[in-house]
Amino acid sequence: MVQPLSYFYETPSQTAGPYVHIGLIPQQAGFDIFETNFGSALVGPDTKGERIIVEGRVFDGTGTLVRDALLEIWQADPDGQYNHPASGQETMASDGFRGWGRTGTDFETGVYRFATIKPGAVVGRNGRMMAPHINLWIVARGINIGLNTRLYFSDATQANAEDPVLNLIEQKVRRQTLIAERSRRGDEVIYTFDVHLQGDQETVFFDP
Amino acid sequence: MPGPAISDMSLSEFIQRDRNIHPPAYTPTYKTSVARSPRHALLSLQNSLSEITGPRFGHNELGPLDNDLIRNYAKDGDPIGERIIVHGRVLDENGRPVPHTLVEFWQANAGGRYRHKKDAYLAPIDPNFGGCGRTLTDENGYYYFRTIKPGPYPWRNYVNSWRPAHIHFSVFGSGFVQRLITQMYFEGDPLIKICPIVKTIPDPDAVERLIAPLDLNASVPLDTLAYKFDIVLRGRRSTLFENKLEGN
């Protein structure tokens, strides 16, 4: 006999279910309970950086809107720094930018929307720069374990072409599923990022 | 267990996730998964700063009743149902506590009805029960909350599918790729072994780890029963010299 390794097993995932809103965004479930609600606005009045809106929809394999999904985003600041000790930030950023937010797709329109800032390029493995990107995590009824993906920006053509993660995607045609298109609507800069859970345009999801 | 101090641990990569203990995406007996499951292989990604970092939350963001579901939505009395405490620790695969991390939970009321505009089950809404709460683990990874034991309820999968009594959990950890949502079940519930959602997990030992035992020692005599539910998140690699994110 050899010594036991004694690692613990990760707790298995279970679907977030149709009522995920109750626990994570109760106002969308239809009631108000907490004094402080976590939400889709990552920016405060003092936040530095280019203000952007990230919005889109989630589709199932038949092309039908997924109107009960919950999305979270995690991103760096305009200098490419995450609000975390591994990124050299022990405490909350002075401008109140945590870099994280959550929201649900709308029960009617299926649209999700985040108000944030454009992140900077982040140092990747072996010192190779990663193009500016936002990390996404998606859960919903029918999704058994949360899906991880990344949103890249359509106007960072050169950085995207050199990005070490986008270049891992063998089928070049699928890289496009991670590129959000830039547009303007009035004073707002919009990046549109649709997620396809399945089908011809299936989004690239990661096992990070 | 030897290894770097916990503050150093937040700099290292995560151990590869063992997908065999989780449900696969496509599980036809849970019908909703059929059209919502990706069919391409997931792209394996060695960790960078984007994966090993994650959001932090503070006590100043939580209210004093956020971990007391008996009181946090009470209008004119206590909610109906069995009073219970749910408690345990959030650990990682290395057996280390996960301190100061956000744990959120939500559930149906004692009759199996959710306070949600999309839930139309005929069991009544309890005017004194919201059904959600949240807390931060302490420095030892410990958490607890007080609530009402949720009831089972029917759902449209097969015409006679019923969910076992369960509480949904959402946990963060210290890196965004530790993010986990799961469900806690109650010891002795005969609905567990016939539930299509439980059965999405292929490994019966993994299912056992979602079932909270009655913990009489943690109960409050003449007042409240207790159930114990430990949660394990992905662990970080402990050998820093092998996993520098740059230069190796």
Image (cartoon, grey):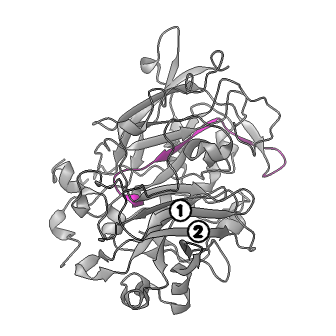
| Residue at which label 1 appears | A114
Tell me which residue sits at (29%, 76%) in the image.
Answer: A124
Q: Position of residue B242 (x, y in %)?
A: 18, 69
Q: Is residue A167 above or below residue B209?
A: below
Q: What residue is rendered at 25% in x and 50% in y? A: A91
Say what amino acid the circle numbered 1 marks: Phe
Residue A103 lies in quadrant = bottom right
Q: Which residue is mark 2?
A: A55
Q: Is residue B15 visible?
A: no
Q: Nearer the viewer, residue B201 or A64?
A: A64
Precedes in sequence: disc 1 or disc 2: 2
Percent coordinates x, y for residue B4 in the rendering: 15, 54
Tell me what residue is drawn at x 24 percent, y 61 percent.
A86
Mark 1 touches mark 2? (CB < 8 Å): yes
| Element under disc 2 | strand
Q: Secondary structure under badge 1?
A: strand
- Asked whether residue B154 is in view, the answer is yes
Q: Which residues are magenta?
A: B157-177
Q: Is A198 positioned to the left or the right of A166 in the image?
A: right
